[in-house]
């Protein structure tokens, strides 16, 4: 996916990160707050890159790595089958230098595009002071349950207009 960012901020390109390239994305994961080693994170990513239940999406702006998102299809619901199948957004991160340029929105749209044919619901938690305002700006509403400091967002993908 590629398109112009709002306000003439340049071109953003968003696509799935292929196996063998995660080490190039490690600085962004580290900036988000990982305390793991690059070697362990890379090995974990390589396992995930070959698992169809996982997707890591990278964003480039002005030809530079600017953000990433990681989403997981949790599989068939034990009581309801695929009618209530859910995916979990684990990470969505944009480097500080690139924030406010539409990259987070582009990543979220790519996550939804990946999840929609697989699952009915997309859910995630966000820090009330840090990332929840971003998701609220996109029009999503979180519930302060079970953790008030990390609202839970639950999106029925049948209702997303895209």
Image: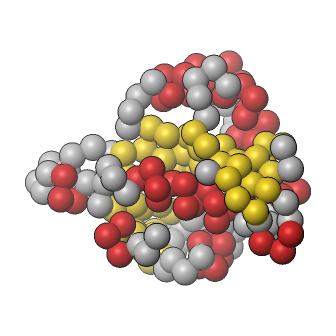
- Quarter where residue 44 is shown: top right
Q: Is residue 157 left or right of residue 89?
A: left
Above or below, 117 against 133 in this view is above
Q: Position of residue 50 (x, y in %)?
A: 45, 24
Q: Residue, x 84% and y 74% (percent of image)?
A: 7
Taking 129 as reference, is 73 left or right? left
Q: Is residue 67 left or right of residue 112?
A: right
The residue positioned 37% from the left and 57% from the top of the image is 116
Up the image or down, 34 lies above or below 23; here it is below
Total numbered badges shown on the rendered structure: 0
Q: Is residue 36 visible?
A: yes
View extreme (front): residue? 3
Q: Position of residue 131 (x, y in %)?
A: 65, 67
Q: Quadrant of residue 107?
A: bottom right
Image point (13%, 56%), residue name: 80
Can residue 44 be seen in this snapshot?
Answer: no
**Residue 96, how many percent across, how many down?**
84, 57
Quarter of the image holding residue 121?
Answer: bottom left
- Depth check: give the residue in front, 147 or 93: 93
Instruction: Please state the horizontal and vertical placement of residue 139, each as a whole percent of the image.
Output: 55, 80
Residue at the (86%, 69%) spot, across then down:
8
In the image, is residue 57 above or below residue 111?
A: above
């Amino acid at each position: 996916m590629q398109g112009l960012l709002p306000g003439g901020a340049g071109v953003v390109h968003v696509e799935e990160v292929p196996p063998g390239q995660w080490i190039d994305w490690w600085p962004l994961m580290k900036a988000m707050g990982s305390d793991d080693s690059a070697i362990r994170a890379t090995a974990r990513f390589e396992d995930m890159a070959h698992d169809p239940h996982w997707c890591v999406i990278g964003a480039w702006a002005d030809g530079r790595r600017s953000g990433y998102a990681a989403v997981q299809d949790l599989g068939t619901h034990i009581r309801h089958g695929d009618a209530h199948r859910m995916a979990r957004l684990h990470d969505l991160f944009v480097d500080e230098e690139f924030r406010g340029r539409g990259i987070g929105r582009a990543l979220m749209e790519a996550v939804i595009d990946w999840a929609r044919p697989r699952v009915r619901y997309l859910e995630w938690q966000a820090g009330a002071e840090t990332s929840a305002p971003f998701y609220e700006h996109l029009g999503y509403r979180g519930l302060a349950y079970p953790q008030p400091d990390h609202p839970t967002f639950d999106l029925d993908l049948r209702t997303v207009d895209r």
